[in-house]
Image (cartoon, rainbow, N blue to C red):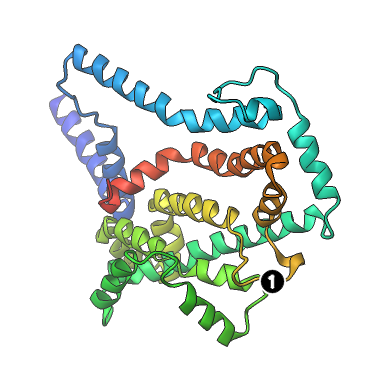
Amino acid sequence: MARKEKDLNEIKSRRIDSRPFSEISALKVSRRSKKKKRINRSRAGDIALFCFLALFGCFSALPLILTVSNAFKPLDEIFLYPPRFFVKNPTLDNFSDLVNALGSSLVPFSRYFFNTIMVTIVGTIGHILISSMCAYPLAKYKVPGGAIISGLVVYSLMFPQSVTAIPNYMVLNWLGLIDTYWSVILPAFAYSMGLFLMKQFMTSVPTSLIEAAKIDGASEFKIYYKIIMPLVKPAWVTLIILLFQSLWATYGSSTIYREDYKMVSYALNQIATAGAARQGTLAAVSLIMIIVPIGVFVISQSQVMETMAHSGMK
């Protein structure tokens, strides 16, 4: 009986050993992830921590509550002092005024909306592809000058957008891209934060997985989109959120002067800043502009936290 069990164990070990190295590594990683770490903490500490986080969360939600409430307030409640957080007499007049103002515009609102959607989608997808392809060799191979490039990427994070606005304009003007969609899309491709996050996350990917894939005959491009990209999903989901929010709210007014190429945020801002009588319309515009970015963030917030942990950012 003991000999039969020994033979059975040997057969099982052979089956496991006969698998490709990449499959064995993935199996080990999944088993480690299933192990739960036991945290030694008192119940009173858990309750105190929960109360603190709940209080902090409610405090952080106050601006969002005020924005939603103001969108449905009549003008007399908007100008009320001291202001109220919650609306007393809700109305849709602010949204109807916004629709009437958009209907009287020379350029249809659908055109502004198309411009924003096109720039946001192309800029986000293009940046994910370019930053990941650049980060892959920097993170997993010894590229000549790779340390210098990585240092320049980190140093570029210290410069605000206002510092690079004039050089960006000069480059775009030299390329003949002023008054085109590419004047907004091309700078989005060069978003240095994306390359930094991708490189930091790819550094944590085991090199043994890449070597095993090469032994199995996989090409570099296949390793990139079959192994690397699925493993760094939290990183590129985070980039989608960051870049989507940035491009969704961009005006593009510094490089785009044609009215039919303007963004929806520019059109809404022009309507809302027409005077005190448009404060209700401004509240409706604010609500419309934050709905989409907040929705994208809520859907994928867990991926953001995982990316920050791997990148060393707390």
Residue 20 appears in the rendering: no
The answer to whether residue 147 is left or right of residue 82 is left
Q: Which residue is mark 1?
A: 257
Against 147, is 69 above or below?
above
Q: Image quadrant of residue 98?
A: top right
Q: Residue at x 56, y 25 (%)?
A: 81
Query: What crowding class fits label 1: few (fewer than 14 Cα within 10 Å), some (14-19), or many (20 or more)?
Result: few
| Amino acid identity at mark 1 | Tyr
**Going by the picture, which residue comes out furthest to the top?**
44
Q: Image quadrant of residue 291?
A: top right
The percent coordinates of residue 141 (x first, y second) are: 28, 72
Q: Residue at x 67, y 59 (%)?
A: 263
Q: Residue at x 30, y 19 (%)?
A: 50
Tell how many labels.
Answer: 1
The percent coordinates of residue 311 (x first, y second) are: 29, 53
Q: Image quadrant of residue 276?
A: top right
Q: Assign a secondary structure to mark 1.
A: loop
Residue 234 appears in the rendering: yes
The percent coordinates of residue 314 (x first, y second) are: 27, 45
Q: Residue at x 54, y 59 (%)?
A: 124
The answer to whether residue 298 is left or right of residue 210 is right
Q: Nearer the viewer, residue 158 or 36?
A: 158
Against 116, is 36 above or below?
above
Q: Nearer the viewer, residue 266 or 52?
A: 266
Against 120, is 51 above or below?
above
Q: Nearer the viewer, residue 277 or 192?
A: 277
- Quadrant of the drawing holding the N terminus: top left
The percent coordinates of residue 117 (x first, y second) are: 67, 56
Q: Nearer the viewer, residue 217 or 104?
A: 104
The answer to whether residue 232 is left or right of residue 205 is right
